[in-house]
Image (cartoon, rainbow, N blue to C red):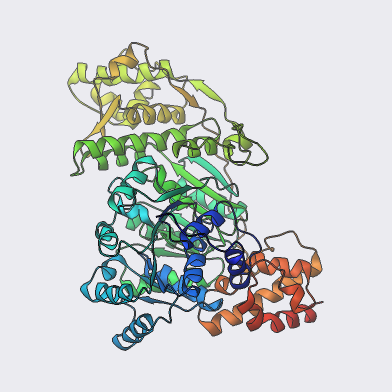
Amino acid sequence: MSPAPVEADAAQQVLHEVFGYTAFRGRQREIVEHVAAGGDALVLMPTGGGKSLCYQVPAILRHRAGQGVTVVVSPLIALMHDQVGALDEVGVPAAFLNSTLDGDEARRIERELLAGRLVLLYAAPERILTPRFLAMLESLAERDRLALFAIDEAHCVSQWGHDFREEYLGLSALHERFPQVPRMALTATADAHTREDIVARLKLEDARRFVSSFDRPNIRYTIVEKDEPKRQLLRFLRDEHEGDAGIVYCQSRKKVEDTAAWLSDEGIPALPYHAGLDAETRRRHQDRFLREDGLVMVATIAFGMGIDKPDVRFVAHLDLPKNIEAYYQETGRAGRDGLPADAWMTYGLADVVNQRRMIDDGEADEEFKHLQRGKLDALLALAEAHDCRRVRLLGYFGERYGEGDEHAGAVPRLRCGNCDNCLAPPATWDATEAARKALSCVYRFRQQGGQRFGAGHLVDVLRGKQTDKVAQYGHETLSTFGIGADVAETQWRGVLRQLIALGHLRTEGEFNTLELTASAREVLRGEVQLLLRVPAETPRRGRTTRTRASADKPPPLPLDEAATARFTALKAWRGEVAREHNVPAYVVFHDATLAEMARERPASLDELATISGVGTKKLEAYGEEILRVLRQDA
């Protein structure tokens, strides 16, 4: 059965009256009208693209039409709290059921649910699939008061994806038990393989697919080779992000702890977050990150999914992620407000070796390992690329950069102008002959003494460096000793990264010694060409001034001196309201909304209502106070 049409202006009216926005973005209107009319949907939309509105607006429309409550499947408690807090601010009855509630509060919410007074209810998949919860859904369905299932972070259902959660597999029961209730699955990250897995596992074969552009034009991508990575990070933060909120991802818990402590000692307020911390510490650190300005969260991948903080100005990686999906998902936590943000990463040979070993030593079957190696190779190709990173990143998800750009028509572009390679194109060199020399040297090691050695020793021999280890094994007598003296050490590391990533070399044992693979013969015969980027020189600087307070940060839009003063006053007022309501400041108003108020300086409630992000409920609740603040700072 085809979905029934939605009244033309109904969705637009909800968008404006409730959320304060004058127009939908991208494909939001299509999605909202399709789902509100009862259609199933698979929605792929980048982080910060307005994914939540795609189910919140239909939920309101269907509730107003007497069709009941929308149940939102969400994997994270923090995200549920944020979403419900934001909906409460705009006057939409919403609640969550999770482990943070005591028994009395949970029962009160259940009564609200069964009485039909909630528009949206958020719950984790494991709770939704309990007999008690399913019985409540049955009761609602019998009275036609179950409007919609919205399955957020739907990539978690795929075992091929980067964030698999076994409890998501049971969500196919929703279709089996409530076939008449429309369903939508939403995610910001899914390659073609993962998309098909979502469709199959959630039984969404007949759902309409909405795939938005994966491009985040406000994010600048920068990837550098490791050379004292903590110092590189510190330069990045001090030069470009003093006083900004951001996330630094590390692979290990120990590295998270060490990096957070080190940044704090350097004057940058930083907190650690990883699964080894107790639940109360994780909650406290996450809460501080969401509610305070200018904090840096140093974390493993245990932190981040569903974090709805719009003013994260950077995401930095001190270690290589597992694949491009993880990289895209993690970097997408920056700049959700659409304002300029940075995705910065440093990586090295050890990253490639470690990721490769984790795949090879895993317990998965060979088919899965083969897929994961391919994903790692794609990420390394992005890191080593000397052309536009955005073009490569979007290409991975099957999108040709610029095709959907209204200014570019249907002609794809080859440069984005907002990544390091576009802003400062790197030099390249033909590393084919160097690769042959490296493999030949590994062969000579085995031929001479039957032993294997690591990358550091290999580079020493190739560059003709006299070390105790070279003397110990007599490697100065090898024909390959010194044949690569004209190649810089950083360039040799790039050659070895590529040879390992491409499978021509593998690492073995505790000491990561190098061994030739069967395909190395192709390189030695000159059948494989390697064109690599010339590593940029790392600037050497002394200690710079300590980080300034986040209160001194300029507004997100260009403002004159008077407007900047109004923006500062509005932020101070917003902070008081946020503390009073016990919500993060951005739940009250985003920085961009305050900046527009400061610039336009509305003098009446009618004028204030034209500011993006000011809906009816917020106008009623805060309008007079905002006008008072603006008059005081006139």
Residue 201, how many percent across, how many down? 28, 51
Residue 494, how many percent across, how many down? 42, 30
- The residue most toward the bottom is 104
Residue 476 seen by the camera: no
Task: Quarter of the image for the N terminus: give it.
Answer: bottom left
Query: In the image, what residue occupies the spot 62% across and 72% down?
Result: 17
332 over 131 or under it: above or below: above
Residue 339 seen by the camera: yes
Task: Quarter of the image for the C terminus: give it.
Answer: bottom right
621 over 508 or under it: above or below: below
Query: In the image, what residue occupies the spot 27% across and 73% down?
Result: 138
Query: In the image, what residue occupies the spot 58% across and 37% down?
Result: 403
- Would you identify the image quadrant in which residue 375 lies? top left
Residue 331, how many percent across, how many down? 48, 51
Residue 114 vs residue 502, the one in the foreground: 114
- Would you identify the image quadrant in which residue 259 lies? bottom left
Q: Specify whether 63 is left or right of 586.
A: left
Query: In the image, what residue occupies the spot 51% across and 50% down?
Result: 233
Q: Specify whether 569 is left or right of 2.
A: right
491 over 103 or under it: above or below: above
Residue 154 vs residue 630, the one in the foreground: 154
Residue 335, how many percent across, how many down? 56, 56
